[in-house]
Structures are given as C-alpha cells and as structure tokens.
Amino acid sequence: MTSQSQGIHQLLQAEKRAKDKLDEAKKRKGKRLKQAKEEAMAEIDQYRMQKEKEFRLKQSTIMGSQSNLAEEIEEQALVKIQDLNGSYNQYLESVMNQLLSMVYNMKPEIHMNYRPTN
C-alpha cells in the first residue's frame, strides 16, 4: 500500500511539475509575444516617420515649384492686363469716333423684306 501511495504521490508531483513547466512556458510565450509586438510597433513607428519625412520632402519640392508657378502666372497676368490697358487706351478714341459717327449719321430706310399689310 505504501508503495502504491508513494507511486500516486510521485505521479501527482510529476503532474504538478508538468503543470508548472507548462505555466512557465505560457508565461515565456506571452513575454515573447509582448516583446515581438513592441518591436514591431517600434519598427512601424520608424517606418512611418521615414515615409512622412520623404512625403514632406516631396511636398515641399512640389509646393515650392507650385509657388513659383503661381508667381509666374501672376506676373504673366499683370503683363497681359498692362497690354490690354495699353490697347484700350490706344483704340479708345477711334472706336468712340466710329460709334458716334454711326449714331449721328443714321439713314432710316425700309427694310427690303418689309411688305405692307394692306
């Protein structure tokens, strides 16, 4: 009987040791997963910062060229406005004279398609 109880006691102890080892392995696995997750998050943050830096660099390059384009367009618009004002001032007198001569020298005529209704 004592050998049986001793065998049972040994089995219980072995089962307890196996359970302890299993619990310890689960804890190590949890720690490894947590560590891997932290490393992955750090790598993701580093990658995100690198890509944001590249994006800002490209954006500043593009926006810089866009601001130059805006300045060029503004300059071209001012030159065009000045040209139009010059043309306006140059032809104002002759256009006004033509318009006034057409108004003053009206010759009323009956249109050739007019037919009396009587």
Image: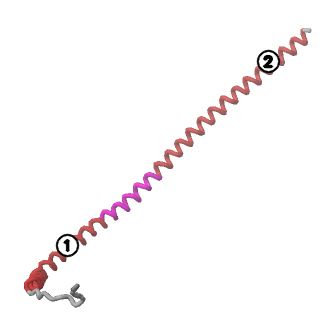
- The local secondary structure at tag 2 comes to helix
Question: Is 19 located above or below residue 82 in the figure?
Answer: above
Residue appearing at x 22%, y 90% in the figure = 112
Near-viewer residue (72 or 20)? 72
Residue 90 showing in the rendered view: no
Residue at 28%, 69% in the rendered image: 73
Instruction: Kindly give the residue lying farthest to the right in the view shown.
Output: 1
Q: Which residue is mark 2?
A: 13
Between the residue at mark 2 and the residue at mark 1, the CA separation in whole angstroms equals: 99 Å
Q: Magenta region: which residues?
A: 51-67
Residue 87: percent from left, percent from top = 16, 79
Q: Residue furthest top?
A: 1
Image quadrant holding the N terminus, namely top right
Q: Who comes first in sequence, dot 2 or dot 1?
A: 2
Write the residue at 83% across / 17% down.
10
Relative to 36, say whether 107 is above or below.
below
Residue 30 visible from this viewpoint: yes
Q: Quadrant of residue 100?
A: bottom left
Q: Is residue 55 above or below residue 24?
A: below
Name the residue beneath numbered marker 1: 81
